[in-house]
Amino acid sequence: MNGLLVIGNVVTDVVARHRGPLAPNTDTPARITLMPGGAAGNTAAWAARSGAREVRVLARVGADSADWHRAALAAAGVTAQLVVAPEQPTGVVIALVDETAERSMVTDVGAASGLRLADWDPGLLAGVGRLHLSGYLLFPPAGRELARAAIAAARAAGVPVSVDPASTGFLGELGVPAFRAAVTGIDVLLPNLEEARLLSGEAEPEAAAIALSQWAGTAVVKLGAAGAIAARAGAVVARAAGVPTAAVDSTGAGDAFAGGYLAALLAGADQQRALAAGCAAGAQAVAVVGARPTVG
């Protein structure tokens, strides 16, 4: 079983690349692109690009763009299990990307917030070697209920589970205790440094990874251009350096890391090689505009 199932959000990204600070009360020139996005869709697409086979994504979108998103995922090598919400539009994220390639996001979760237990089918685990949950799934109560059922089904089937916390903003609203309760039983946690600091209370990457590994199995802290570090059972087990690249847009870099890392694990890599694969995918992601690998 070497398939990957990703559950979470598929949204429409509006990527606005601007030079200089945003000008209040007037116009700021920018290059604006409409693209498919969402952490779950991005991770699945990068996993497929990184060699994972039989990649599936379960997400909820609006009827307004369901066909477009399904086609985009198929072009990326991902089988889309999309629940279509006729009464809600697909979620939209406006990514404001500055001249250093760093992004700030304005998010309307839209239909993605409605993914629920009724959308889950244990049959989705058939042929799956790993289950990955985007943290955005965990913020609405209905999503947490689905997550608990999926984690339980995966554990019963012997399928390892990973979670990417996804957002310090939403994490802060949910609260660390509630997040930890929602991900009980996972095998891998994939936070970036700010998320790791929030979840662990530790400022330094190594200390944060070690603290998180006491309850989250393997804790992999993503450090952007500085690489990544992994800890398990209270000890650092692997490190990887970042891959130098000319960054144009950091949108989806963490999702790309997760996709590359998980694809490597599915192929039998150890933590050192999996971290390196994640860093390589992240470097590819920041070198292109948008959160998905270029198709064609």
Image (cartoon, rainbow, N blue to C red):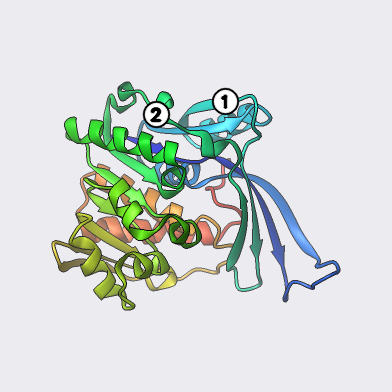
Q: Position of residue 94 (x, y in %)?
A: 66, 54
Residue topped by disc 1? 84
Tell whether 224 sits left or right of 210: right
State whether residue 124 is above or below residue 180: above
Q: Is residue 63 left or right of residue 291?
A: right
Instruction: Pick the residue in front: 269 or 230.
Output: 230
- The residue shown at (53%, 39%) is 113
Where is residue 138 drawn, in percent x and y?
Answer: 41, 45
Image quadrant holding the N terminus, namely: top left
Q: Residue type at mark 2?
A: Leu
* Mark 1: amino acid: Val
Circle 1 Cα neighbour tier, 10 Å, few/some/many (<14 / 14–19 / ≥20) = many
Nearest the viewer among 199 and 247 is: 199
Q: Quadrant of the C terminus?
A: top right
Numbered disc 2: secondary structure: helix
Q: Determine the image quadrant of residue 207.
A: bottom left
User: At 32% across and 57% down in the image, what residue appears?
Assistant: 177
Q: Can residue 1 be seen in the rendering of this structure? A: no
- Say which label, 1 or 2, has the lower sequence index: 1
Q: Residue at x 56, y 67 (%)?
A: 247
Up/down of 67 relative to 47, above or below = above
Query: Label 2: how many residues lie within 10 Å, few (<14), some (14-19) or many (20+)?
Result: some
Q: Secondary structure at mark 1?
A: strand
Q: Disc 2 designates what residue? A: 117
In the displayed structure, would residue 255 be above or below residue 150? below
- Structural distance between the alpha carbons of marks 1 and 2: 15 Å
Mark 1 vs mark 2, foreground winner is 2
> Furthest-bottom residue in view?
204
